[in-house]
């Protein structure tokens, strides 16, 4: 259960990180970036974070 909570926490952190980066971009760039790209970035960062939690350290 602890691993699951850590993975969920990393997904939330990735989501907030991507939103923060997008918020810092100029308005013209924000409008040009499709919502799917932002969602994809969140999924990729969340998957990488979850992978680190599931994979045992060497």
Image (cartoon, grey):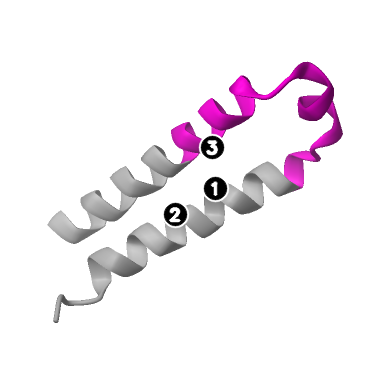
Q: Nearer the viewer, mark 3 or mark 1?
A: 3
Does the image show residue 1? Answer: no
Q: Which residue is mark 3?
A: 18
* CB contact under 8 Å: marks 1 and 2: yes
Q: Is residue 28 magenta?
A: yes
Is 28 in front, or is 43? 28
Residue at 61% of width from left, 21% of height from top? Answer: 23
Q: Which residue is mark 1?
A: 42
The secondary element bearing badge 2 is classed as helix
Residue at 23% of width from left, 51% of height from top? Answer: 6
The secondary element bearing badge 1 is classed as helix
Q: Answer left or right for 58 relative to 18.
A: left
Q: Residues within 10 Å of mark 3 (few under 14, many from 20)?
A: some
Place of residue 38 in the rendered image (x, y in percent of width and height, measured from the top left):
66, 42
Instruction: Using the image, tell me which numbered label, if any, was put on residue 33.
Output: none
Q: Which residue is mark 2?
A: 46
Point out the image quarter for the C terminus.
Answer: bottom left
* CB contact under 8 Å: marks 3 and 2: no
Going from the N terminus, do you reach mark 3 or mark 2 first?
3
Find the residue positioned furthest to the bottom.
58
> In the rendered structure, which segment of residues is drawn in magenta?
15-36
Is 41 in front, or is 26? 26
């Amino acid at each position: 259960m602890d691993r699951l909570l850590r993975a969920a926490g990393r997904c939330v952190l990735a989501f907030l990180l991507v939103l923060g980066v997008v918020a810092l971009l100029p308005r013209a760039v924000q409008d040009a970036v499709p919502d799917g790209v932002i969602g994809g970035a969140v999924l990729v960062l969340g998957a990488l974070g979850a992978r680190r939690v599931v994979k045992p350290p060497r």
